[in-house]
Amino acid sequence: MTTAKATEDGNTTFRRRVFYIPGYDPIPPRRYRELYRKEGSAQAKISGYTLDLAPKKIAGPYGWRVRSRIGGRQTEADIEVLVWSDIVRDSMSNSIPATYMQMLRTAWAYIVSGALFRLMKLRKGPVIAALYPIAFLIGQLLCALLIGWGLGTLIAAVTQPALGLLGLIAVPFVLRWFKARDNKVFAYYLMHDYAYSAQLNGATPPGLATRMFDFGKIIRQALDQDLDEVLVVGHSSGAHLGVSILADLIRDGLPATHPPLGFLSLGQVVPMVSFLPRADKLRGDLAYLSASDALAWVDVTAPGDGCAFALCDPVAVSGVAPAGKRWPLVLSAAFTQTLSPERWAELRWRFFRLHFQYLCAFDRPRDYDYFQITAGPLTLADRYAGRPPSKSRIERAVNRFNAVV
């Protein structure tokens, strides 16, 4: 379906709607606009094309308009953020004792189900990232108790031994001090992230399920419009949200003459959810979407991203690959090759920053360019037509749980 509109100089403008689904992130959507503006400008300068942002002109979620000229062709893309940061913030509003209880429940969910040990067979990076907040929170508690013990010993020495217990008063103050500085270590943030996915053993929380249904209606409306592509981008936890949203949308039926539909999953952590016992719905959605001819699905990760299940085919490793599997096309962003040695040395130990590199500029780009995908004159399917998947992808079924609904 070609709907590019003619411009005054006789050329045509490629028109796209992009829906970006963030991961478990409490930041407001305007931060994504600023990231796109800054990094898009840098990538355009590196790659030799023009990219300009303008205010959004259509109704709908928060977003912005992008105009580009790439290879002599003009594109207009309306990019919108499907916001669930309010749900994230609400889930993070726990007290310190409640967070420690979350830690115990989450560890129990992954250990007793065996999911933790199976995840380690895929990639150790994201498993270490999952254990990191547990280690930090336990370390902070031990430190607070040690300070309390030391203070109690001092009080007992200068007053009476029975008053030594007063040292425990210091423990909550020390823990609050640690929590106030969590923007440096992200222990509480990551604990809330993993706890949110594990709270129902992989089933989607009701509030999030309702929001996802609303997202599906917004995307469905775009598929009724005169466009050259509708592209859904899911980053991190947003990738498995995108899987379920699109699977439900396609099951319900797409318009007879809808524009091409693309799904770009970036830095996915799908196994963290699909390996849990009650993730039947997600596993069913993975199987269904992987066999659909109603969309093109490209999954991009990088071994340099320690927070993602790099090059793990999310359908295959979850143990639900159907006989007619078509998707996803698993590709590597290859950070060590697409970033210069100087840039890689600057970023390689900034793990959380690297998890967002898919949305940023590469100073040695290859065939992955987030800005050409979202604001360039080719559909996702055309851009990667004939592209072979990464040779180092992981496709072996590792999941113990493969029930689907």
Image (tube, rainbow, N blue to C red):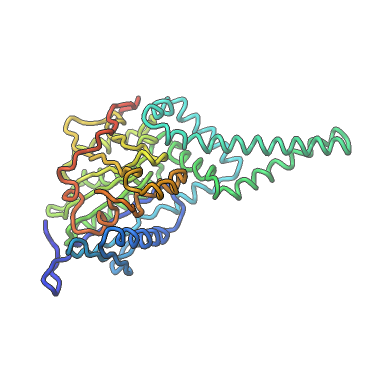
In the displayed structure image, the side of residue 68 where residue 34 appears, left or right: right
User: Residue 57, can we see it?
Assistant: yes
Q: Position of residue 246 (x, y in %)?
A: 26, 46
User: Residue 244, can we see it?
Assistant: no
Q: Residue at x 50, y 29 (%)?
A: 108
Query: In the depicted view, which residue is nearer to us: 213 or 51?
Result: 51
Q: Residue furthest bottom?
A: 8
In the displayed structure image, the side of residue 141 where residue 281 appears, left or right: left
**Looking at the image, residue 374 lies above or below residue 355:** below
Q: Residue at x 61, y 36 (%)?
A: 139
In the displayed structure image, the side of residue 395 where residue 277 appears, left or right: right
Q: Residue at x 34, y 37 (%)?
A: 310
How many numbered circles does the render carry?
Answer: 0
Q: Position of residue 294 (x, y in %)?
A: 17, 46
Residue 284 figure quarter = top left
Q: Residue furthest front?
A: 341
Q: Position of residue 185 (x, y in %)?
A: 54, 45
Figure quadrant of the C terminus: top left
Figure quadrant of the N terminus: bottom left
Q: Position of residue 366 (x, y in %)?
A: 26, 49
Q: Residue furthest right?
A: 159
Residue 270 figure quarter = top left
